[in-house]
Image: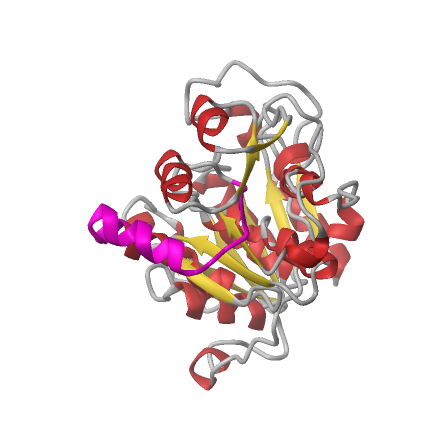
Amino acid sequence: MGQTVIANSNIKHIIVSRTDSIGDVVLTLPVCTVLKKKFPQAKVSFLCRDYTRAVVDLSASVDAIISWDELMKMPAEQSIQLLESVAADAIVFIFPDKPVVRMAKKAGIPLRIATSRRWHTFFNCNVKVNIKRRSSDLHEAQLNIKLLEPFNINTDYSLNEIKNLYNLKNIQVNDSIKCLIKPHKFNLILHPRSKGSAREWGEENYLQLIESLNPEIFDIYICGTSREAETLNCVTKLNLPNVHNFTGKFTLSQYIEFIAACDGLVAASTGPLHIAAALGKYAIGIYAPMRPIHPGRWMPVGEKAKYFVLNKSCNNCRKSENCACIKQISHLEIAAYLQKIL
C-alpha cells in the first residue's frame, strides 16, 4: 500500500509522467483532475511525448506540459538541469519509463512515486505503491489513480465517477473541419487499424458493417494514419457517396476536432476510441477476450461508451496478432446497436 508522504501545504508542483501511447495518456488525464481536487493551489505538469501533446492540451487540469522528446534531444547534463529547474515537489510515474525514472532521480525531485514491481523503480523511486497491473481486475484508469495513494487521497473511484474526471476544455472546431460533416446525418468514424496496440476486428468486418448501415442515415469516415492507409486494401477504395476516406488527412489536433464534430466512432482498443469516449461521443470498442488486453482493463470510459467482446476466454492467439475471437464478433451486432442509438 502507499503511504502519506508530505503535508498538503508543502505540495506546490506535481509532475504526472506518461510517455507512451495516446490511449494511455487519455486514461491518465483523470489523475490530473484528482490531484487538482486534492491540491487546488498546486501546479500540475504533464511529462509526455510530443505526439500525444494534443491530447494533454485538452485537459483543464494540466497547467504545463514537459516534452520528453525535447529532454531526450539535449545533452544529459542539460536535460537534468532543465528538469531540476521546474522545481517539482513530486513526480508520479504512471508509466515508469526507465530513462525518465533515472533522470528524475538525478534531477533531485524529492518525491518519486511509482509501482514497486520493477527493479528500476525499486532503486530510483523513494515512494512505492504495490500494484499488480497485469493480474488486477481494475481498469487502467482506476489503476492510474491508485498511484496517488501516497498523497493520502481516496483512490477508490468507480468507472462511472472517472468518466466525469477528464475535465476537458471546450474544443473549438475549425470551419475546415465543420465543412466535412453532414449535419442532418449520423456521422460515424471507422478506425480499422491500431498501430499494433490491440487485436484488430478485420477489414472484412468493417466492410460488412458499412454495407449493413443505411446510407440515407449514416455518413461514414475511414480514418487512420498514412502508414495505416497503406495496409487497408478495400475500405479506403470504396466508391460510395456516403463513405469518405480520410486516412492520413489529419494531424492529431485536427483528428480530435473531427471526432468532436462527429457522432460516433468504431474501433478496437485504440487511442481515438478513448478520445471519443472522453469527448462524450458514441465510442464503440471491439475487444479480444484475453488478459491483459480485455475490456475489463481497457474499455472506453465515457457517457456514451460501449464495447463488444465474446463471452469466452481466449488464449490461442496470445502470440499472434491475428485473433479469431475478435473477428467472430458479428457486424450485425454493431449495426443493431447503432440503429438502437437512433
Image height of 198 relative to 131, above or below: below
- Of residues 179 and 82, the one nearer the viewer is 82
- Asked if one can make out residue 211 in the rendered structure from this viewpoint, the answer is no
Q: Is residue 93 magenta?
A: yes
Q: Report whether 297 appears left or right of 98.
A: right
Query: Coloured how?
Result: secondary structure
- Of residues 227 and 219, the one nearer the viewer is 227
- Of residues 52 and 151, the one nearer the viewer is 151
Image height of 165 relative to 308, above or below: below
Q: Quadrant of residue 309?
A: top right
Q: Which residues are magenta?
A: 72-94
Hey, which residue is sitting farthest top in the picture? 316
Image height of 56 relative to 159, above or below: below
Residue at image x 50%, y 33%?
125
Residue at image x 65%, y 18%?
313
Hey, which residue is sitting farthest left in the picture? 75
Q: Report whether 83 appears left or right of 269.
A: left
- Asked if one can make out residue 123 in the rendered structure from this viewpoint, the answer is yes
Q: Report whether 13 appears left or right of 40.
A: left
Residue at image x 66%, y 28%?
310
Hey, which residue is sitting farthest bottom in the picture? 175
Q: Is residue 86 magenta?
A: yes
Residue at image x 29%, y 57%?
70
The picture places residue 189, in percent across and down from the top left corner, at 52, 59
The picture places residue 337, in percent across and down from the top left corner, at 72, 50
Q: Quadrant of the C terminus?
A: bottom right
The picture places residue 41, in percent across and down from the top left corner, at 67, 67
Q: Quadrant of the N terminus?
A: top right
